[in-house]
Image: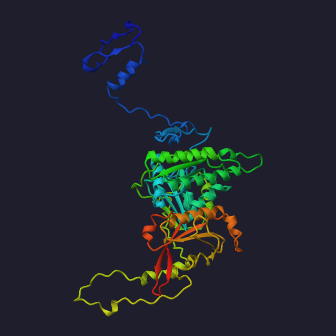
Amino acid sequence: MFDDPSQVRRSDGPSSPSGPGGFPRLRTDDANDPYDLLTDLFVGPEPTSAPEPRAPLPASESAPPLRNEPGPIALGNPSAVPEPARVTREAPAHGSQPRRGTDGGDGVRCRGATVELLIAGNLPTLAAAWVSQYARSAAALAGEPVALVRLTGATLRVEIHGEPATLASQATERAALRAAALCCRRVIVHGEADTALAAACGDGEHQPDEVSVLFGCDEAGVVSAYRAVKRLAAAWSRAGGAGPSQSGAGAGEAELPARPRGVTLVPIGSAAAKAAQASRRIEDAARSFLTATVRCTAPIERVTAGAPARPLLDSAATLSLIDVLAALRQAAPGTSAQRPGEPDAPEPAPPEPAPQARSVVTRAGAPLLDAVPATRSDPARSAPAHAATRPTHQPMKHTHAIAPLSSSLSELIDADGPLVLLRARCPHAPGVELALDAMGTLHALRDDTAHDAVADLVAALGWAAEHAAVLSLTTTEPVDTAAAPVGHFFTRRPSEARRLVPGSVRVHALARTRSGEWAAVEL
C-alpha cells in the first residue's frame, strides 16, 4: 500500500489511540492518506458532535428528476422480450428553475403531460377492462400516476391510476382535464375507435403526442390493427408525413404541434410467442406497403386485479374527442392541483351524480321492466297474499318506438329524431341496415338472428366509413362523411352479447310487449 516502507512508523505516545485488538494504529506522514481516512471512519471513536449540515445546492445544480423509459421490442424476433427499464436524467434548461405551484404549498407538483391517444381495435372481450389494464400497466411501469380519460358514447370519465393519495374531485369537464394534465406526466385518452382514428388523422392543436392501438392476436385483431395503421399512414402522408418534423414554423408563423411519433401496437390476450408473431405480421406489412413507423410493446396477457382508480369526474359529455385533446394541450403548466384537506384550500363539494342521457326510446321502453313478471317461488299455502299486495300491471301504451322485429330496426331507435333507412347495403354484410339521423351521421344496425351477426356489423361499419361519400349519392338527405358511423346491436340476450360486441358498438336489449310487438332499450 505504501511506496516507501520507511514512511510507516509505529505510534508509541499516549496521543495515539489503539486500533482494534489493542494493536497500535498505523499512521503515515500524510494526514490525508486514504488508509487513515477509512480507518477513522470505520474503527475510530464515535464523533462527539453531529457533522455540520452541507449547504443546499443551488437550483441550477440540483439533480433533475428521474424517469423510467422502457426499451422497445424488436418486432422481427418472435422470442423478443422487453428490455429492462433504463433510468435516465432529463437535462434541465440553462438557467431554469424547478417548477413550483402558484400556491406555494405542498400540493401535487405539476409538469407537462404527454398526451397519448389510445385506439381499441378488435379486442377479445370487454374492451373497457383491457383499457383499464393498459393504464394500470403503464402506471406500474413508470412508477408514477397515469391519467385515463374515457369518452364513450355520451359519458366522460377522468380517473387516475397508480395515485396513492386522494385527489379532489372536479365539478366540470375542463377542470378535470386540467387537473389530469397537471398532476400526471402521461394522460391516456380513449374514445370510440372510428372517432379516435378521425381525430388522429386530422390537423390542429388537438394532435396527440403518441398514438397506440390495442389489438387481439387473432386474425380479426391483426386485420383491424393493420387497417388502423394504414389509415393513419395515408392521412399523415397526405399532410406531409408522420413524425415530429412538422413542428417547425417560419418567421411570423404560428408553430403547429408535431405529429405523433409513429404508431405503437399493444397486443393483448396472448402469450409472448403468439403476440410476437402477430406483431411481426403487421410490422412486415407496414414496412412493405406503408410509410408509417410501427413499434410494438410487450403483450398484456391477461386482466389482473389492481388498486381501484381515483375518479376525478364521471358525467355526461358535452365535449367531443377533439375538444378533449385540445383542452389537455391547453392546460397551463406551473399551477398545482390541491388535495382535499389542505388548510389554504377548502375542500370542494362532491360532484352531482351524472345525469343519464335518455332518448325518447329509452324513456318509452323503461316501463318494460315493470311489465316483465318476476320469477316467483312457491309461496306458503297457509299465508295467502293480501289483495293490496297483488301486482297490478297497466297495459303499455303503443308508441312510435315499438315495432315488430320483422320490420326495420331503425324504427326502434330515436337518435334526436327518427332514422332514415337507406336502400344501400354493405356487399360484405347485406343483413346490416344502414340509416341516417337528423345530423347526417351514418348508423349500422344488426340483430342477433345470425351466428356471425357481430362480425357482419363490424364489417359494415368499416365499409360505411370508407365509402361514406358513395353512400351520400344514394340519398337526398345530407350525409356527414367526416363523422364516424355508429353501430347498434339488438339482442335478446344482452348479458351474453356484451362480452362479444366491441366497446364502440351500442347494445340494445329486445323485449316483447303484451301485444306481441318488440321494443328496444339501450344499455
Q: Is residue 289 left or right of residue 389?
A: right
249 or 152: nearer the eye?
152
Q: Is residue 243 above or below residue 406?
A: above
Choose top left, top right, bottom left or bottom right for residue 228: bottom right
Question: In the image, 251: left or right of 278?
Answer: right
Quarter residue 399 falls in? bottom right
Q: Nearer the viewer, residue 19 or 12?
A: 19
Task: In the displayed orientation, state which residue is furthest to the bottom.
Answer: 387
For the N terminus, which image quadrant?
top left
Image spot of residue 34 (x, y percent): 41, 19
Which residue is depicted at the point 38% across and 33% down?
A: 50
Would residue 286 be found to the left or right of residue 140 on screen?
A: right
- At 50% from the left and 76% from the top, the residue drawn is 521
Front residue of 304/271: it is: 271
Inspect this view and state whether residue 425 appears: yes
Residue 443 in the image: above or below residue 249: below
Q: Position of residue 295 (x, y in %)?
A: 56, 45
- Residue ranking furthest to the left: 382
> Measured from the top left, where is residue 440 in percent x and y?
66, 71
Q: Is residue 411 above or below residue 156?
A: below
Q: Is residue 433 above or below residue 134?
A: below
Image spot of residue 262 (x, y percent) = 61, 47
